Image (tube, rainbow, N blue to C red):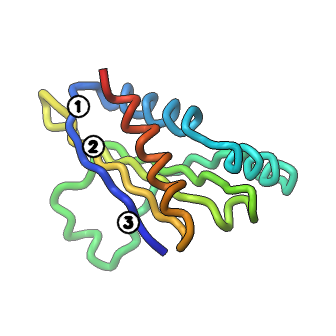
Amino acid sequence: MGQKAVEFQTRLSLQECGQRFQSGIKGGRGISSWIGGLTAMAMGGESLTFYTPQDNSPFASLNTDPPSFAVGVSVPKANGAHMHGTNVHMYVWDRGNHRDVTLAADHSLAGGAHANKLIQAVRSQFDG
């Protein structure tokens, strides 16, 4: 199991950040992910499963700076649908005149390239 992450700042609103995350994930999926989505749907699931990440750590109550907005998505791969997919999270902190954004992806041992591709696809939605 591995993790990739990137941090940056933006002047986009929280709502715009959420929209950019969703469009980046949907547009950044490769062939294997599309096939995995079809497999997941055939098994009665969703091709993409968006959710709110939860901090289940016993130390979560000590967090003095929780994100203003958090979203996660489970992106399947062709081999095993969601079981071998990548989970991508976005955490956004509203700092008044800007937002601090962290994109993080948990991935399987062989899923580093998939995780990096998804993070870059989302990150590119914030450029320009």
Q: Secondary structure at mark 1?
A: strand
Earlier residue among tags 2 and 3: 3
For the residues labelled 2 and 1, the Cα–Cα distance comes to 7 Å
Q: Are marks 1 and 3 in contact (CB under 8 Å)?
A: no
- Camera-near label (2 vs 3) is 2
Q: Earlier in the sequence, mark 2 or mark 1?
A: 1
Residue type (three-letter) at the residue carrying disc 2: Val
Look at the picture and state if 102 lies above or below 105: above
Where residue 79 appears, x then y in whole percent? 75, 63
Disc 1/disc 3 C-alpha distance (Å): 24 Å
Residue occupying the point 34% across, 29% down: 126
Q: Give the secondary structure at mark 2.
A: strand
The image's mark for residue 37 is none
Residue depicted at x 54% and y 50%: 73
Can you give x and y, in whole percent of width and height, for residue 60 in the image? 29, 70
Left or right for 30, reference 127: right
Quarter of the image for residue 20 reads top left
Depth check: give the residue in front, 36 or 113. Answer: 113
| SS class, disc 3 | loop
Q: Which residue is drawn at the image coordinates 57% and 46% (left, top)? A: 50
Q: Amino acid at mark 3?
A: Asp
Q: Do labels 2 and 1 touch, CB within 8 Å?
A: yes
Q: Are marks 2 and 3 in contact (CB under 8 Å)?
A: no
Q: Which residue is mark 1?
A: 10
List the residue tagged with mark 2.
101
Residue 115 x %, y % = 49, 55
In this view, 3 is above or below 78 = below
Q: Quadrant of residue 95?
A: top left
Quadrant assignment for the C terminus? top left
The amino acid sitting under disc 1 is Thr
Q: Any mark on residue 55, and which? A: 3
